[in-house]
Image: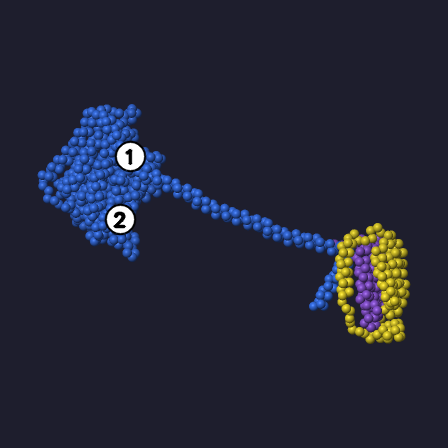
Amino acid sequence: MSDLTDLLIKLIPIFPLLAVISNGLLGSRYSHDVAHRLAWGSVGLSFLCTIGVFTDILRTGAVHEVIAYQWIFGGDLTINLAYLVDPLTCVMLLVVTGVGFLIHVYSVGYMHGEAGFTRFFTYMNLFMVSMLLLVMGNNYVVLFIGWEGVGLCSYLLIGYYYEKVSAAKAATKAFVVNRIGDAGFLLAIFLVFVNFKTLDYTKVFAQASQLSPEMATAIALCLLVGAIGKSAQLPLYTWLPDAMEGPTPVSALIHAATMVTAGVYMIVRNHAIFDLSPTAMGVVGLVGGCTALFAATIGLVQTDIKRVLAYSTVSQLGYMFLGCGIGAYTAAIFHLMTHAFFKALLFLSAGSVIHALSGEQDIRKMGGLSKKIPWTYRLFLIGTIAIAGLPPLAGFWSKDEIMAHAFTHHHYLLYVMAAIGALLTSFYMFRVTYLTFYGSSRMDHHTEAHVHESPMVMIGPLMALSFLSLVGGLVLGFPPEHGWLHKFLEPVAGIASEHAVSAGLVFLLMGAATAIALIGWGLAHFLYSVSPATADGWAAKFSGVYTTLLNKYYVDELYDFMVVEPLKRWGEMLDWFDRTVVDGIVRGVGQMADWGSAGSTWVEKHVIYAGLNVIGYGNHLAAREGRKMQSGMVHHYAAIIVAGLFLLALVVQLVIQM
Amino acid sequence: MVAVFFAYFALVSIVAGVLTVALKNPVHCGLALLALLLHVSGLFVLLNAEFLWAVQVIVYAGAILVLYLFVLMLLNLKTDERYLHPSYLYFLGPAVLGALYVLLLLLQSPYGGAKGDAPVVAVLQDGDTHAVGIKMFSDYILQFEIVGVFLLGAIIGAIVLAKTPKPMDAGKD
Amino acid sequence: MIPLSAYVAVSAVLFITGLLGVLIRRNFIIVLMSVEIMLNAANINLVAFSHYLESMAGQLVALFVIAIAAGEAAVGLAIIIVVFRGKISTNVDEMNLLKW
């Protein structure tokens, strides 16, 4: 049985890979129907394999380490393309393949009629391969390969509408900011190798306790830098809102459910190292808390429906980091899962709205859609309630667990940050809902005439996701800290240090969380449903704050000024140097060659030819004069005889003298 | 005394020689040549060679020169305006220089050589003719015969060359 | 006593004169006469040396020279006659059949 599991494990990334190769190389030869069937079919097969592996692990609890390919082995260093499948991996695999499958199916409807249909699915499958490698790898190198792969696919997919300048710029921005994080990640890998002489997880984590606290902190902080880049935390979050230029399924899959969660996964995977450094964990928690709060404030006033969801994602990722920072790894993973469900749901529903409104994304131009697209409306509402954290939907359980853990372990600052963040989250999500679906229509007439519900192929996955949002929390995480997920992940993530917590406190905290969510809803209801004028009044009164929030605290402008412009200046300088100095040298050398050849040509013409000509001319001259000797005139001959005679006399005389 | 005679003969010889070469009219040249021949024979007398003096006058001046004059009269040459070569300067220059050089040589070096067996006294005793005759017919008899044959050849050659070609011999010339 | 070098000088001058005549004159008969002058110069030389070196050889050779001069003059003049028959002029620079 174990062999079958190993086989299934090896197959999981193979199916999408085959689809990539087929769609990528041969995609132009067959119809779009075949292409998309290959795409979601392969992901579906991967999901089935995952189920098989999952059931096996559920039964036996065994950890599978499978080597797919022996890659580098020599001396100190052995790096194989190998997979480590333990409960943590299983959870991630289920999320990736499951939610991924649903999003692929949705995309068939959403991307219908697009010119680059096959290209889209090729890139999506490539992303799946990379993400699977990332979560399944048993050493840092395979992780990094997947890490870079998802970054690449993010770039390709954000820039899917490559003719749009804003999309191309956003894609580049995503890649570059990610890169900054990757530098830190690489540093961490080097440090790990230097300290442990190996890059396999099992070996590293077994010896982790041998690290000095300083080294552990260093490695942990470097890993954190990588995670910050990938998961869009402060200060490397600026790429995520711009990444909304990509198609909505991309936003759902990559920037909500899977890629951005890679950072969280990586921290949880390395918890053995993080546990050794309270400093690093404090930093993680602080980063998470600040991000959660910061992003939530920006999300309050945004007008693009996808932007709101993007900032919401950044904020929720902050919660996950917060959970990691306080040691609640299982809680963080739990929130990761529920977030995948409701965020994917929200994004895809938003996509459905945009599809219905023929591309409109500005919520100021929506309104009164609840009657016109009822299914989309209902499903979006479920997602909103889930993210706001109202029980018994999924978001409540996971968010509450993190907040409770923070409170009971005396991280009061983080608790306050999380609580305020939750309030703001509830507020802005309901704001979006009210502005989009309620009230009088603010659409322009042409759009309004064409409003239509999305096809089943799009609604179907939404329904599946909403089901998960409704019951997922209960199934996975109830009762808090002792749910099925906690038991499942216990070998890996470890039980967060248990305080004896009174049941009363638990209920109190749960009540507090619920109250926060309700207050947020109420406020949104008041401002956007009952009395919209008040909202405008507040915007006018606090116009400074309002403008700052609207412009995202001018962070992008700050980065532009501090980093981008100097780099551009530096690049221009180097270009000038290259063009003037280097090319000048090259041209100078060429010029020398030119002169050299001109010189040698001159020499050849004037010296060598002249010499030859002189010889020839001299010969001619001598011959011409010499010819005169044959004048036929006897007395000339006589003269020559006389001359010869005198010469002879001279010679004889000289000889005699000697 | 002897020096005066030598000077006279020498100078006139030279002048006659120059005139022979320089005069325009060929007959005048012939006459100058005659003068030269006679004065050269005078030089011979001063050198105790009377026989040669006689031979010179009889043969050279009397026969050879006459022959020249016969031919000159026969050909009836006109005095040419251009009687020197157009490019005579090219020859004149080097020849003069060469002459100077030779003179220089001559005036410098002492002349010596093996003395023979006919001192002046002995010659003067019997006369030059006797001495020449004795030498010729004893030591130099071969050369004598050869010269005779040569003269015969010359005569025949001259006759053959100069005869009027017969009409049927017009082709071979 | 007249030194030998005087005779030799006279001989040399005459020889040069005759040589010049050979080279310069256009009329062939004058050329032949110049050859006679040269021969005479040689004769003076021979006889002078014969006298001063007290040998008869010089005089004898001079005698032979005279004989040969005669023969040569005869033949030369015969040639002139032959040429004159062919061409009216005896100018040497018109006898240039050997020209290239």
Along the viewing direction, whichever of A211 and A512 lies nearer the viewer:
A211
Report which quarter residue A658 is drawn in. Answer: bottom right
Q: Is residue A250 found left or right of C7 in the rendered image?
A: left
Which labelled disc corresponds to residue A554?
A: 1
Q: Locate residue B152, reporting x and y percent.
A: 86, 66
Q: Locate residue A103, reporting x and y percent.
A: 25, 38
Please tell me whether mark 1 or mark 2 is closer to you in this view.
1
Residue neighbourhood size for the residue with mark 2, other residues' Cα within 10 Å, grouped as few (<14), some (14–19), many (≥20): many
Specify the subunit that label 1 lies on. Answer: A
The residue shown at (76%, 55%) is B90
The residue shown at (30%, 52%) is A71
Looking at numbered disc 2 in the image, what kind of residue is underneath it? Answer: Ala
Chain A on-screen colour: blue
**Secondary element at tag 1:** helix
The residue shown at (61%, 52%) is A611
Looking at numbered disc 1 in the image, what kind of residue is underneath it? Answer: Tyr
Chain C on-screen colour: purple
